[in-house]
Image (cartoon, rainbow, N blue to C red):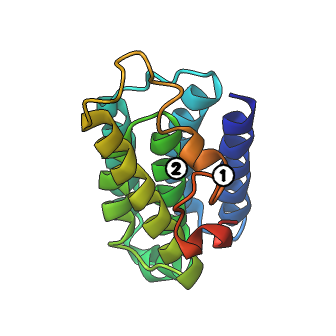
Amino acid sequence: TGADGHRGSALLASLQAKNKDGAEALQPIAAAIEAVVAQLVQGESCLSGRRLRRAVHHFEQALGRCQQDKSALEATGLPARALSGLAKCCLQADKPFACLQTCRKARQHFLPEWMQQELQYMEQAARAAMQMRESPAAQPGAGAAGPVPLVRQGGSAGGGPPGAEAER
């Protein structure tokens, strides 16, 4: 969980840094994501899909409230970056379906090139995790040993896509 916690706080730091760029309206967005990240940092990997969906919902509501800043906000890539961070958290918490849904939402925003590759990688990892879960060979107790290592290192799982190395 140390690595997850580190990733969580790194995501948080980047959100807070972006907030200093004057977009005060981003505060509620950062707060919504902060809540999810805090739960992940505490090692609550049983994070419910409902709670993740609620965080994404709060995120979108906050986004809606800053309509006047919306184009400036989109240009920073922050909405997509935050959702991408949330998708990564879902994947680390072994919630592949929530990860796919969050990736889909992230794609509705302006995406820098590297982030498109990152989302693609996460979607593939989430699909692989879901397939592993459905295959009869997967033991019910193999939760932590299952899909999580896919995320730890880019291509260590073998068939990682070429974009995996671009993860920043």
Q: Residue at x 55, y 68 (%)?
A: 78
Q: Which is nearer the eye, 134 or 165?
A: 134
For marks 2 and 1, give the CA distance.
Answer: 10 Å
Quarter of the N terminus within the rendering: top right
Q: Is residue 2 above or below residue 160?
A: above
Q: Which is nearer the eye, 103 or 83?
A: 103
- Residue 58 appearing in the image: no
Residue 118 locus on image (x, y percent)? 53, 68
Q: Residue at x 41, y 15 (%)?
A: 141
The residue that label 2 is drawn on is 88
Amino acid type of disc 2?
Answer: Lys
Q: Which mark is residue 11?
A: 1
Q: Is residue 118 left or right of residue 49?
A: right
Q: Which is nearer the eye, 163 or 47?
A: 163
Residue 77 locus on image (x, y percent)? 54, 75
Badge 1 marks a residue whose secondary structure is helix
Q: Residue at x 39, y 37 (%)?
A: 95
Q: Is residue 161 left or right of residue 128?
A: right
Q: Which mark is residue 99?
A: none
